[in-house]
Amino acid sequence: MYRTHTCGELGLKDSGKEVTLCGWVQRSRDLGGMTFVDLRDRYGITQLVFNMETDKELCGQARKLGREFVVQAKGKVRERSNKNLKIPTGEIEIEVTELNIINRSELPPFTIEEETDGGEELRMKYRYLDLRRNSVKNNIILRHRVAQEVRKYMDSIGFIEIETPALIKSTPEGARDFVVPSRMQPGTFYALPQSPQTLKQLLMVAGFDKYFQLVKCFRDEDLRADRQPEFSQIDCEMSFVQRDDILDTFEGLAKYLFKQIKGVEFTEPFRRITYSEAMENYGSDKPDFRFGMKFQDLTTLVKGNGFQVFDGAEYIGGICAEGCSEYSRKQLDELTEFVKRPQIGAKGMVYLKCGTDGTLKSSADKFYSQEDLGKWAAAMDAKKGDLILILAGEKNKTLTALSELRLEMGNRLGLRKKNTFVPLWVVDFPLLEWDEEEKRFFAMHHPFTSPKPEDLHLMEKDPGKVRANAYDLVINGVEIGGGSVRIHDASVQQLMFKVLGFTEDEANAQFGFLLNAFKYGAPPHGGIAFGFDRWVAMFGGQDSIRDFIAFPKNNSGRDVMLDTPAQISEKQLNELQIKVDLKKQD
Ligand code: ASP
């Protein structure tokens, strides 16, 4: 038997027991006649002790142990004189009587400690060593726990987990497909699913009225901290439901997970706001509701005093930062610089300080009387001591810039607390988005999303105005999930393809299998998919999903450990009848 116990379970209650432990050498220390070795495994760290006086040879052996050696130690549990109450096993140690080196280790390229000296690239190259670090290991265990809870809950409410294939035909989720060449039908390709969207709809036609799957999805797009070329979704679909049935069901899942994983209980229903309210009031379709600072539209109020910045603007909006009227020149300059960054794009910022003594001071007070400024303050619902920040310009751009400014003020005022969670549903997204470059509409969600029935008549007349029966679950400014009620009527689906610019033949070539299925009794259905990695990262209190994935890719989509993507052999290419002819990049 390799071991009787793990390195994380022994305590005072076990004093006197003869035990055998296995693990990795975290570190060893020689103190005069004693040598101490910290032995680590997945469960924790236990201190081994060797005494020069009682067993010189064994102690000599222990002194030769290097970091990350795999060893087996036999001995007796005893109370420690110098206790470490920070770890569960810190009250005991093992007085070792036998030591076996199971495997030696080269010196690891970085220290396997919480505070490591290894940079990101190095840690990714040796990810199996990085995964030995406590924080990363715990993230992976957290991921496992969330997955188990998802399965438990979904099963308890009658959902069936069904696997769908990974070699499929292109699914239109708005990104580029990863493709896989077929050897048996040379010159043809599978696509890896951007999501199992069409397949889960086919499962509804098949009569499985409650489906879910923890599933890998693949999207060939530019990467950011919260994106990976392959990622996981909790993918769900239901039949014979309307929007609110779906929202209620998955609000149940969200509440359950928060309770089980974070111990957070939501007793009230999640707030629901429409996409247009979110955009008008917060400049974002995923507003962070941990704090207020709702926008006020000041356009009509402030125009007409000869102040060019305002008079020439399509939209003028403000936010009110409580208790910030004492902001210094320097702080205000910093904020102005912030909004002028190219990625934010405002031309400048106007402020109004509502002093604690009742004075009103603005950067535009050349153009406005105290009475005018008083009206601004009233419109903004500002109190003495508050600071009003105003941006002006083209409407959509200004709303977006104001949203960034709001988040920045939220950060500065400490209003975006890590352990506060405020979920909300954003509903009624637009069905279509106009693409200026291609001069055509694209589906904002995907082409199977149902228009709101009351907007159906606008489909051909004014497609940009049609609202979708689509929704997102947003938590703390992060889109955690999104879905929609689907089109289940072949004629509406055909109309949708028409508006998207597909000819009937193109639509049939691409989605004939779905249109065909809809001829055989498609039930009304709808669903949602949650970004599983993101949700786990949020539970783990971090922004980047990378540390919650055992073997992630870097920002250029490379797995630096496997050293891939890589070339394949001439033989493989020949079997596929593929000739690589790289175009020169300039
Ligand atoms: N397939 C969609 C997505 O991946 C989610 C859904 O509509 O259920 O975003």
Image (cartoon, helix red, strand yellow):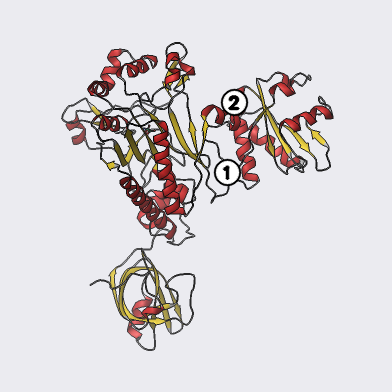
316 to 233, vertically: above or below: above
**Amino acid type at image mark 2:** Lys
Ligand 1's quadrant is: top left
Q: Is mark 1 within 8 Å of ligand 1?
A: no
Q: CA distance from mark 1 to mark 2?
A: 23 Å
Considering every residue shown, the one lying at the far left of the view is 184
**Quadrant that contains the N terminus:** bottom left
Q: Residues within 10 Å of mark 1 (few under 14, many from 20)?
A: some
**Picture coordinates of residue 412 (x, y %)?**
65, 45
Q: Residue at x 61, y 44 (%)?
A: 411
**Amino acid type at image mark 1:** Arg
**Picture coordinates of residue 107 (x, y %)?**
38, 63
Q: Nearer the viewer, residue 171 or 64?
A: 171
552 to 404, vertically: above or below: below
Q: Residue at x 30, y 13 (%)?
A: 504
**Picture coordinates of residue 546 (x, y %)?**
42, 46
Q: Nearer the viewer, residue 506 or 32?
A: 506
When asked about the image quadrant of residue 315, the answer is top right
Considering every residue shown, the one lying at the far bottom of the view is 53
Q: Residues within 10 Å of mark 2 (few under 14, many from 20)?
A: some
The label shown at residue 290 is: 1
The label shown at residue 397 is: 2
Secondary structure under badge 2? helix
Secondary structure under badge 1? loop
Q: Does residue 533 show up?
A: no
**Picture coordinates of residue 446 (x, y %)?**
38, 26
Q: Is mark 2 within 8 Å of ligand 1?
A: no
Left or right for 424, reference 161:
right
